[in-house]
Image (spheres, rainbow, N blue to C red):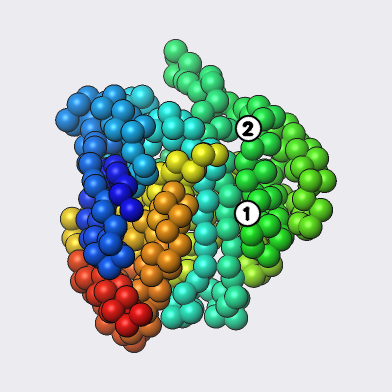
């Protein structure tokens, strides 16, 4: 299969983990006989430095022509004081919006080898396997006005949603639940927010089309608590943009590290951008210790969702599992036994596991 992939490494550890994903894709194409072509484009702080904007036109054009996009991470202290429109994060929000990537799927499944790596008790973490379906192109992140008054003494952000924006993400979540354990938890703040009342109304309406799916509503504060006290009660969680952002970082604790969580940002036609849930990790950038697995697992999601290469996606996931099984782990994972390795070593081990897997088939 021939596919053209645009790589957006971005800032901080973005470049380091992107190199890892590319190496793994090369291992997959060698084993399975695919031919991927790559084009790198600038986004985020690096794009501000080189082009004076966090999302250059050339980058948007390249992404629109790509079969799929991989993104590392954007942002960092160097650019924190820039005006809002020049911040690296605006580049990420911009590309999501430009491409209409409204559905952000964040699967959270603990690897059994990492049960001890979570600060939560093993009996709490065990059996947790959930999918957060986060709305990605609406809500507080995109509402207008979002500004500070001229005298600087007041601010406004706007949380707005059109009914159809809620409908399409809720539908995506119902469809995802159907492919899993058929349980959907909708998370909102319907006891306070108008947007959440409409959200709940839409979920209630849509559930008539999915009678086989069990629906539960939870307020976001309680959901945050239940995620770390009884995570195995969740199957699919659907929620608006900012709640989904916060809950997914929280849920990463179940896996042992934020460096383990991949994500897929999709629109209806299967076009997708794949990115780890974590950010540019300025505290460890340049030290060659970043965990590349979130990015590598994001590449697996790309093979699955954009290219329909299920076997290849599984090959990556199994290779990760096997590498962890032998005790290899990066410094973010708090494991007593086993061997601590850096980003490159971890990547090499996963690549080797892919090669040996296929050789024995
Ligand atoms: P972060 O996710 O970058 O880091 C949080 C903590 O997790 C840090 O201690 C970091 O070292 C650790 N961590 C994250 N990924 C890791 C990995 N792969 N391996 C090992 N450790 C890892 O969040 P932050 O520090 O709040 O934000 C830093 C910058 O990243 C900010 O500019 C923020 O806006 C940006 N950000 C970008 C994205 C994105 O591009 N998708 C996501 C979140 C944050
Ligand atoms: C994420 C990040 C982004 C978000 C930021 C960097 C804009 O935290 O992808 O989770 O909030 O969507
Ligand atoms: Mn986030």
Residues at circles 2 and 1 in contact by the CB criterion of under 8 Å = no
* Nearest-to-viewer mark from 2 and 1: 1
Q: Say whether disc 2 or disc 1 marks the residue closer to the N-terminus.
A: 2
Disc 2 versus disc 1: distance between alpha carbons?
Answer: 17 Å
| Above/below status of 327 relative to 234 | below
| Residue 240 visible in the picture | yes
Residue 176, labelled with which disc?
1
- Mark 2 secondary-structure assignment: helix
| Above/below status of 280 relative to 324 | above
Q: In this view of the protein, which residue sits in the foreground, 222 or 323?
A: 323
Residue 271 lies, in percent from the top left, at: 45, 41
Residue at 31% across, 28% down: 61
| Position of residue 154 in the picture relative to residue 45 (left or right) | right
Residue 9 lies, in percent from the top left, at: 26, 46
Q: Quadrant of residue 301?
A: bottom left
| Position of residue 42 in the picture relative to residue 298 (left or right) | left
| Position of residue 223 in the picture relative to residue 80 (left or right) | right
Give the residue pinned by disc 2. 165
Q: Quadrant of residue 206?
A: top right
Residue at 77% across, 50% down: 210
| Residue 292 visible in the picture | no
């Amino acid at each position: 299969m021939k596919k053209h992939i645009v790589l957006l490494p971005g800032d901080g550890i973005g470049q380091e983990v992107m190199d890892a994903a590319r190496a793994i894709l090369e291992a997959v194409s060698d084993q399975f006989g695919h031919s991927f072509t790559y084009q790198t484009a600038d986004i985020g702080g690096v794009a501000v430095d080189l082009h004076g904007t966090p999302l250059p036109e050339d980058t948007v054009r390249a992404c629109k022509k790509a079969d799929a996009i991989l993104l590392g991470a954007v942002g960092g202290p160097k650019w924190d004081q820039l005006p809002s429109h020049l911040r690296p994060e605006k580049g990420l929000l911009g590309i999501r919006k430009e491409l209409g990537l409204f559905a952000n799927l964040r699967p959270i499944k603990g690897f059994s080898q990492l049960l001890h790596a979570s600060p939560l008790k093993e009996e709490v973490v065990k059996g947790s396997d959930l999918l957060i379906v986060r709305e990605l192109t609406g809500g507080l992140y995109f509402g207008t006005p979002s500004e500070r008054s001229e005298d600087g003494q007041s601010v406004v952000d706007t949380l707005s949603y059109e009914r159809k924006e809620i409908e399409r993400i809720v539908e995506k979540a119902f469809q995802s639940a159907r492919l899993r354990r058929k349980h959907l938890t909708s998370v909102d703040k319907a006891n306070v927010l108008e947007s959440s009342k409409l959200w709940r109304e839409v979920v209630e309406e849509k559930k008539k089309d999915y009678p086989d799916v069990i629906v539960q509503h939870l307020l976001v504060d309680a959901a945050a608590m239940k995620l770390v006290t009884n995570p195995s009660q969740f199957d699919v969680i659907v929620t608006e943009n900012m709640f989904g952002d916060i809950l997914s970082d929280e849920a990463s604790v179940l896996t042992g590290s934020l460096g383990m969580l991949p994500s897929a940002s999709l629109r209806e036609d299967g076009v997708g951008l794949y990115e780890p849930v974590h950010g540019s990790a300025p505290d460890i950038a340049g030290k060659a210790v970043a965990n590349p697995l979130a990015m590598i697992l994001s590449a697996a999601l790309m093979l699955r969702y954009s290219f329909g290469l299920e076997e290849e996606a599984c090959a990556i996931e199994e290779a990760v599992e096997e590498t962890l099984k032998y005790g290899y782990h990066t410094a973010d994972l708090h494991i007593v036994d086993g061997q601590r390795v850096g980003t490159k070593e971890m990547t090499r081990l996963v690549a080797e596991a892919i090669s040996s897997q296929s050789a024995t088939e």
